[in-house]
Amino acid sequence: MTRASVVGADMTTFGVHESTLSELFAEAALGAYDDAGVGPDEIDALYFGNAMGGQTENDTHLAPAVASQVGLAGVPCQRYEDACATSANAFKNAVEAVEAGIHDTVLVGGVERCTPETGLGTGEMTRIFASASDRHYEQPTGLTFPGVFALLTKRHMHEHGTTEEQLAHVAVKNHANGTRNPNAHFGKETTVEEVLDSPIVADPFHLMDCCPFSDGASAVIVTSDDRADSFDDPVDVSGVGHATDVVPLSAKPVPHATQAARDAAAQAYEQAGTSADEMAFAEVHDCFTGAEVMASEAIGFFEDGEGGPAAAEGRSSMDGDRPINPSGGLKAKGHPIGATGTAQIVELAEQLRGDTGERQIDGAEKAVAHNLGGDAATTVVSVMEVRG
């Protein structure tokens, strides 16, 4: 098997857009073409991520529709749906297809429209998001994702002493990072006091502990090892892990451990022949501040129970020893579900190429992305490194 490399990457701004779904994806895809210096005639397949289009767009046949908008009519194209891990799963499958020699070069990305521009209100969009939770035991009770992650985080607080103030430090850090990212939904700093004074959404989460609904798209171009050297600044994909867990919270043996993330991280590090200690930074799925704390432990950046104190001590800040979410994360960058996974890959690629300006992690040679879906029941972890 050959290795895979990312040779092109781009994303739209995340926020509120008036563009259609196809227009948003085309903006990111054409940007990735330009970044790689390729045309659609050099793309063998489209691996496309969209989680909620069947409900939000009344469109369940999206892959060929968007393919024709980016010059790919006629090539194999497939839509992936795996809740918030949707485009990370598309990326994982694209990498495997390239490594197996099925395709030489693949366009992979995702898109979602989640703001009121869809014509749907916050309540209806919250219900649609909640369709990724357990259908039999959670949805009928009205449990939505703020509640899901609040329960996981409360258990973490019970076991490890994590505090609301430590969670607030995660929000402060990611908003500060978001001010350095021109594609971020939120470019405004906040303070611990402002986070703790914001309204309670689901104990222990305040409004400022929660990521926003966003519109946006992201795309990357994945090619084979023997083609990568013909591109400028390829970034190697050295490992991708994918694991699942039982869905109902009540059935998880250790819910706050987010076991799927631990399993996926172990797979990715083993494939890459590396470890968490060698990662210069991480992009993790911080849909809520507690989710970042749990993720930071699951991917091995901190020992169990250290994620909260580490955030408060500044260890996960840009100038800390274990930087997390230099992009601003979901918390500040935004969260268009189907686009989030490959947006993390865009950040890794640009950081490892040294192209992120004010938020650049100096000397970054290896990095890891963690993207979860649903009740932390699906996680994809990707390790990338500077081409040697």
Image (cartoon, rainbow, N blue to C red):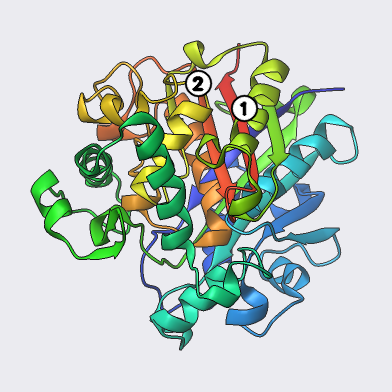
Residue 201, image quadrant: bottom left
Question: Dot 1 surroundings within 10 Å: few (below 14), some, or many (20 or more)?
Answer: many
The residue indicated by pointer 2 is: 300
SS at badge 2: loop
Checking the image for residue 113, the label placed there is none
Q: Can residue 190 be seen in this view?
A: yes
Instruction: In the rendered view, tell whether residue 362 sits above or below residue 99.
Output: above
Residue 260, image quadrant: top right
Q: In the rendered structure, are the residues bearing label 1 and label 2 in contact, judged by CB atoms less than 8 Å apart?
A: yes
Checking the image for residue 265, the label placed there is 1
Question: Dot 2 surroundings within 10 Å: few (below 14), some, or many (20 or more)?
Answer: some
Instruction: In the rendered view, tell whether residue 290 sits above or below residue 362.
Output: below
- Image coords of residue 268 (percent x, y): 67, 25
Left of 101 or right of it: where is 265?
Answer: left
Left of 262 or right of it: where is 162?
Answer: left
Q: What amino acid is at disc 1?
A: Ala
Q: What amino acid is at disc 2?
A: Gly
